[in-house]
Image: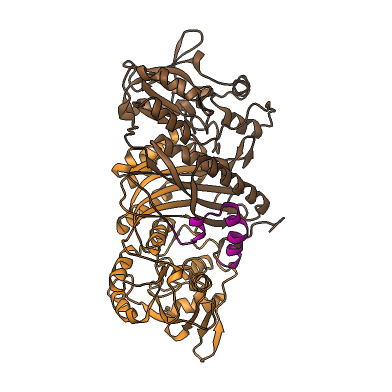
Chain colours: A brown, B orange
């Protein structure tokens, strides 16, 4: 199956589907649990578990720093990490458009395998469907994930109190800027690429450095603005960010200016926000900076007892503006 | 959100996505675990678990006897049941095409809720993505499922030995015939409708009646022909079916004749095949017939030490023909 295309029959559960599985999918992902080829995988887990799902419809499928395959692993691993769980097992479901190149499929699968290795997670069960030409757009991927909850972890918006520090793990907006630049044919220097990365290991380091982290979230769709507005609303505390402290690359800020985007609304795929008691934040920041996925971490603001449920930004000029929940139309299919 | 349509912004993680969640999705599915609205659900499970995933791309979305929503719950619950597990938790991921009717979405969600109740399973985590007009086809659904493995159950093709009986739980082909008839505008009597149903309860009854069931499978895509060929190949035993004993409705056989289809290749969504030692099969059949999802169960054949890895059919005329693994093109997007 070299220079070939996906046909409808690859998705209909017969010989051609079997050949796709045996010759393309299994060699790319193969592991003993997946090879049992049951309708479902049998797994051993201990303690409480976390369970999450995400579909990935990013366009373009391949981009600097990653692909839909890398995203599909990292995104779900990170969702588990944000609930205080270590990702163990992923499912992988492909919806492929008729005519999609089997070589490109192999590249997507290779990225999935590599990212799964990096995140120390196993793909244990899967599914492939094919839809007609024009009823999809290349490939859509769903991954669901099971993780083991780290004992003692208690991650919940309920834990957010006034006077805590808001930390972000690094430069904002790299993923969205890379995708938007590709769509608008904007040249970016090599330093800017998608930040898609599994954050499970960083989270482990953070949990050790700061036992009372109130909440962690990965600011994907809707960016920091959406994530913090949601947390502010749920916890009914206020949040005040300091524009000067927000870490972002000049080139990404340039893309924002060019396209009229707000850095706080840009999606990230390898960053997290943590809200943590003030007396643990310096220790936490030091631990994060020692990790390769946290070396540009920064305290960007704090929670307040005023402006309950709202997020404010102290601008470079000293004014305070409200950071609104984005309406949601700036960047479709960013992940 | 009455007579409205899905817009791109509903999938971009901001205010409009939040409104869709708060006003449409949560009211339709709401339960306490889902309402925590974490990036993932925290769950308690005991013992070993089974994990499975399936995407659903059936066309049309609504059909007699069900919808893509009912299918998305039953299919995944059944995959878990076939591994000897009782489904506990489902994830739900929607990929919706821009312009899809929000009223139709509500109907799909209502079917999901009803089927989840029927199967005694909870939707605990979810995701919604929107793709542009022409990059999808209404709605695609992925469900992943977690089930608790029934203690002592050992369901594996390795357990299949010659001389066992092959049992099917009821009339074959109802689901595929319903879908194909709808696509080809063939009138069918009201008795024929999709058989989509959760089989977890039937499986429990079966496990009690016959402790040594070797394997169970739900013959979905590719039908009984694909399922038995796969099992014959994996176990390297032969299988011989008796055409006279295969349960199918006359109207469904009529659709097969009209469209040139083989009843053994038609997808089922509420049927299972069990292979069981001969000395337990009568007891098992009796138990199945007492259950509403097994009342038309029948022994349709047996495993043999000849023709290893192959499936044969003794026709009504007494000849034996080989039942091939379907190529896979007869019925795209059947589930």
Q: Residue at x 53, y 19 (%)?
A: A247
Residue A234: x %, y % from top left: 33, 29
Name the dominant secondary structure of the magenta segment.
Answer: helix
Q: Is residue B56 visible?
A: no
Q: Nearer the viewer, residue A2 or A43?
A: A43
A30 in the magenta segment:
yes
Residue B69 percent across, percent down from the top left? 41, 55
At horizontal 28% and vertical 73% (from top left) the residue drawn is B209
A322 on left or right of A101:
left
Q: Is residue B219 left or right of residue A46?
A: right
On screen, residue A222 above or below B236? above
Looking at the image, residue B176 sits to the left or right of residue B111; the answer is right
Depicted B242 relative to depicted A161: above or below = below
| Quarter holding residue B131 | top right
Q: Nearer the viewer, residue B111 or B326?
A: B326
Residue drawn where x is 49% and y is 25% of the image: A169
Range of magenta residues: A14-41
Q: Residue furthest right?
A: A3
Asked where in the image residue A321 lies, by quadrant, the reply is top left
């Amino acid at each position: 199956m070299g220079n070939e295309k996906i046909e409808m029959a690859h998705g209909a559960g017969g010989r051609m589907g079997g050949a796709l599985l045996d010759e393309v999918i299994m060699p790319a992902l193969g592991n003993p649990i997946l090879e049992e080829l049951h309708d479902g995988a049998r797994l051993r887990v201990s303690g409480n578990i976390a369970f999450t799902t995400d579909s990935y419809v990013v366009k373009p499928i391949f981009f600097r720093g990653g692909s839909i395959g890398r995203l599909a692993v990292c995104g779900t691993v990170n969702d588990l990490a944000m609930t205080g769980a270590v990702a163990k097992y992923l499912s992988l479901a492909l919806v492929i458009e008729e005519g999609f190149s089997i070589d490109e499929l192999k590249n997507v699968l290779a990225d999935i395998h590599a990212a799964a290795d990096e995140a120390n997670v196993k793909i244990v069960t899967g599914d492939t469907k094919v839809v007609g030409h024009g009823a999809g757009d290349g490939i859509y991927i769903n991954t669901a994930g099971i993780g083991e909850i780290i004992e003692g972890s208690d991650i919940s918006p309920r834990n957010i109190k006034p006077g805590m520090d808001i930390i972000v793990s690094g430069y904002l907006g790299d993923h969205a800027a890379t995708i938007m630049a590709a769509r608008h044919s904007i040249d970016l220097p090599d330093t800017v690429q998608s930040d898609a990365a599994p954050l499970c290991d960083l989270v482990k380091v953070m949990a050790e450095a700061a036992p009372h982290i109130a909440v962690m979230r990965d600011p994907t769709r809707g960016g920091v603005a959406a994530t913090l507005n949601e947390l502010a609303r749920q916890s009914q505390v206020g949040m005040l960010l300091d524009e000067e402290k927000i870490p972002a690359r000049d080139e990404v800020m340039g893309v924002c200016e060019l396209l009229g985007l707000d850095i706080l609304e840009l999606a990230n795929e390898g960053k997290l926000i943590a809200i943590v008691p003030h007396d643990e934040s310096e220790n936490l920041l030091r631990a994060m900076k020692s990790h390769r996925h946290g070396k540009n971490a920064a305290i960007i603001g704090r929670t307040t007892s005023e402006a309950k449920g709202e997020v404010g930004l102290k601008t470079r000029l000293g004014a305070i503006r409200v950071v609104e929940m984005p309406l949601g139309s700036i960047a479709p299919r960013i992940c």
